[in-house]
């Protein structure tokens, strides 16, 4: 359904053009022209030449319209006839040489072409906006396209492609049509029940609609879960490194991100503020936070206390908490640390209880035992540590992995310190955290769409409450709840009765660049 012309922006019928490839020196640059004025532009740049065969590459000299002796470039020219094009309009694409002067000259020449259509440089995202307005893409697909353009990791790209298929839009439109039909039946009852005989009583009809809503509500829950997982992939998985001072949190961060992002020192309590670094692990965008070591002592100052407060808050806000335990001398005098396993060689495994408590409540947790370079009874200590962790975090059974940042630093690789094994465990955990089952399209549900689905659920719940009134049910109110639910679905796709579509478009198109 084409949106009403009242919501078409000013300049919608102008012919627009833009450099669609990145600016700068390159082998090829593509200039895209969209709109009815394409033919005037073609004639001005390629005077007396026959039109290019649709969808076929045609070699043409592009001439300066104000001086036809001046050949601007020799280009490959494509004409894509409306309506089956990326914008739904006629498209002319000029594949020119990518030098700065060539691009500048051809763009200037297009601006000079005469036409009864207004010809102007495109605004950011205007090609895609036209695709939406000409019904080539729904709003969910536009959002997915924006995500695809900004994708930096493999998993971000995959999630964006899932939203691009149009499948989600078709599902929401199907639900909306079902609601509209149900609402139609309710309204028929309201308008005509006095004059005509209906097979169903209002209460029966409302009950029937309730049973149709049930499967949609269930599906919405799956879509919202998919959205949460998709958002993890798009915005990145937030990981906190938590543990007592000196366990090696900063050392581990530096090894993972392969640079000195955080200060490492033998002085306990070095890290105060949170140090955040993004890194791509196996295609997953991860945002690691190195935090202040947790300890409780009357001797620590105000700055460290604030660091500890921030560390706890950060960990509680994370998707995954990595607790660092470490192998230290058994006679460690630090009263804040708790012995997880005692060793024979004068070295035992320690951690602080506060970090483990936070891990017990975290969505996902992994325990890493660092400084394993110094112990000779690692296997036994690890066994004890696992048992102790299972007792301290009942029902969680987090993975426990031993590493040595020192070995990794000294060898300059990941395997000697067992960091490779930790990265494998992380990747497996990310896979579990973002597993939507077979329906991978659910990863394409955006945060905006998920919020609208929540509102839609609320409307359904109100409808169901009304239905529970039985014969007392107010059918006008029930129909209104269905209308509101259908409006939420319309706002997801940007189709139908989405009254505030311009506002929604503004938000969605914010991140688009010129030429897209
Ligand atoms: N033997 C050994 N020492 C390590 C290892 N990893 C880190 N260290 C040392 O432990 C000390 C503390 O390391 P950091 O990475 O600063 O520890 P942290 O947990 O960030 O410490 P805070 O900032 O105090 O919370 C430094 O002297 C490191 O060189 C390891 O695998 N083996």
Image (cartoon, rainbow, N blue to C red):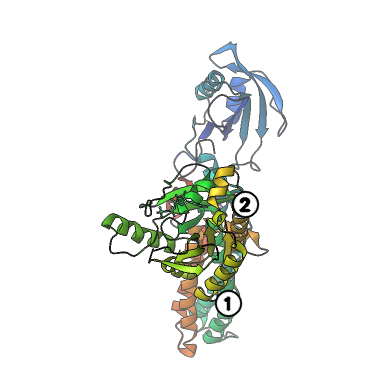
Instruction: Please give the name of the residue rendered at 49% of the width and 40% of the height, measured from the top-left corner.
Output: 12
Out of 444 and 16, give the one closest to the viewer: 444
**Percent position (x, y) of residue 499?**
45, 58
The kind of secondary structure element at disc 1 is: helix
Residue receiving disc 2: 420
Q: Is residue 342 left or right of residue 301?
A: right
Instruction: Please give the name of the residue rendered at 45% of the width and 77% of the height, measured from the top-left corner.
Output: 462
Q: Kindly give the residue lying farthest to the top in the view shown.
A: 69
> Nearer the N terminus, badge 1 or badge 2?
1
Q: Kindly give the residue lying farthest to the front in the view shown.
A: 345
Residue 222 in view of the camera: yes
Is ligand 1 within 8 Å of the beta carbon of the residue shown at mark 2? no
The kind of secondary structure element at disc 2 is: helix
Q: Which mark is residue 214?
A: 1
Q: Is residue 134 left or right of residue 362?
A: right
**Percent position (x, y) of residue 69?**
60, 9
Q: Kindly give the residue lying farthest to the left in the view shown.
A: 302
Out of 224 and 406, give the one closest to the viewer: 406
**Is residue 316 depicted above or below 251 in this figure?**
below
Instruction: Please give the name of the residue rendered at 73% of the width and 31% of the height, measured from the top-left corner.
Output: 56
Out of 113 and 395, give the one closest to the viewer: 395
* Picture quarter with the N terminus: bottom right
Q: CA distance from mark 1 to mark 2?
A: 46 Å
């Amino acid at each position: 359904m084409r949106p009403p012309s009242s919501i078409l922006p000013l300049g919608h019928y102008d012919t627009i053009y833009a450099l669609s490839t990145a600016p700068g020196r390159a082998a090829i640059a593509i200039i895209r022209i969209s709109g009815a004025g394409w033919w005037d532009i073609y004639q001005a740049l390629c005077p007396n030449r026959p039109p290019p065969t649709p969808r076929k590459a045609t070699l043409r000299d592009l001439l300066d319209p104000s001086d036809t002796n001046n050949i601007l470039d020799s280009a490959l020219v494509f004409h894509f006839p409306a309506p089956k094009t990326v914008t739904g309009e006629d498209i002319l694409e000029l594949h020119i040489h990518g030098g700065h002067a060539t691009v500048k000259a051809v763009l200037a020449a297009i601006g000079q072409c005469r036409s009864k259509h207004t010809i102007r440089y495109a605004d950011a995202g205007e090609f895609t906006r036209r695709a939406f307005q000409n019904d080539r893409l729904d709003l969910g697909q536009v959002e997915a396209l924006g995500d695809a353009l900004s994708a930096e990791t493999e998993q971000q790209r995959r999630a964006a492609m899932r939203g691009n298929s149009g499948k989600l839009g078709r599902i929401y439109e199907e639900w909306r049509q079902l609601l509209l039909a149900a609402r139609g039946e309710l309204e028929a009852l309201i308008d005509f029940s006095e004059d005509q005989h209906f097979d169903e009583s209002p209460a029966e009809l409302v009950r029937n609609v309730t049973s149709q809503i049930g499967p949609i509500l269930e599906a919405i829950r799956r879509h919202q879960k998919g959205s949460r997982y998709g958002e993890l992939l798009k915005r990145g998985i937030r990981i906190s490194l938590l543990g007592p001072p000196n366990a090696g949190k900063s050392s581990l961060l530096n090894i993972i991100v392969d640079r000195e992002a955080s200060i490492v020192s033998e002085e306990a309590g070095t890290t105060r503020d949170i140090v955040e670094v993004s890194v791509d692990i196996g295609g997953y965008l991860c945002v690691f936070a190195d935090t202040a070591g947790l300890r409780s002592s009357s001797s620590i100052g105000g700055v460290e206390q604030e660091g500890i407060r921030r560390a706890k808050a950060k960990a509680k806000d994370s998707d995954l908490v990595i607790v660092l335990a470490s192998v230290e001398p058994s006679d460690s005098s630090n009263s804040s640390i708790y012995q997880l396993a005692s060793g024979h060689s004068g070295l035992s495994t320690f951690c602080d209880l506060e970090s483990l408590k936070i891990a017990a409540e975290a969505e996902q947790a992994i325990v890493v035992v660092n400084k394993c370079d110094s112990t000779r009874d690692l296997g036994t200590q690890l066994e004890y540590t696992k048992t102790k962790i299972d007792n301290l975090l009942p029902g969680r059974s987090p993975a426990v992995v031993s590493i040595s940042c020192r070995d990794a630093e000294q060898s300059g690789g990941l395997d000697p310190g067992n960091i490779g094994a930790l990265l494998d465990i992380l990747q497996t955990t990310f896979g579990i955290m973002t597993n939507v089952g077979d329906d991978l399209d659910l990863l394409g549900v955006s945060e905006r769409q998920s919020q609208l689905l929540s509102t839609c659920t609320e409307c359904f719940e109100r409808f169901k409450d009304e239905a529970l009134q039985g014969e007392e049910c107010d059918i006008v109110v029930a129909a209104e709840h269905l209308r509101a639910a259908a409006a939420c679905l319309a706002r997801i796709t940007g189709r139908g009765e989405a009254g505030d579509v311009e506002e929604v478009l503004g938000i969605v198109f914010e991140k688009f660049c010129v030429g897209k």
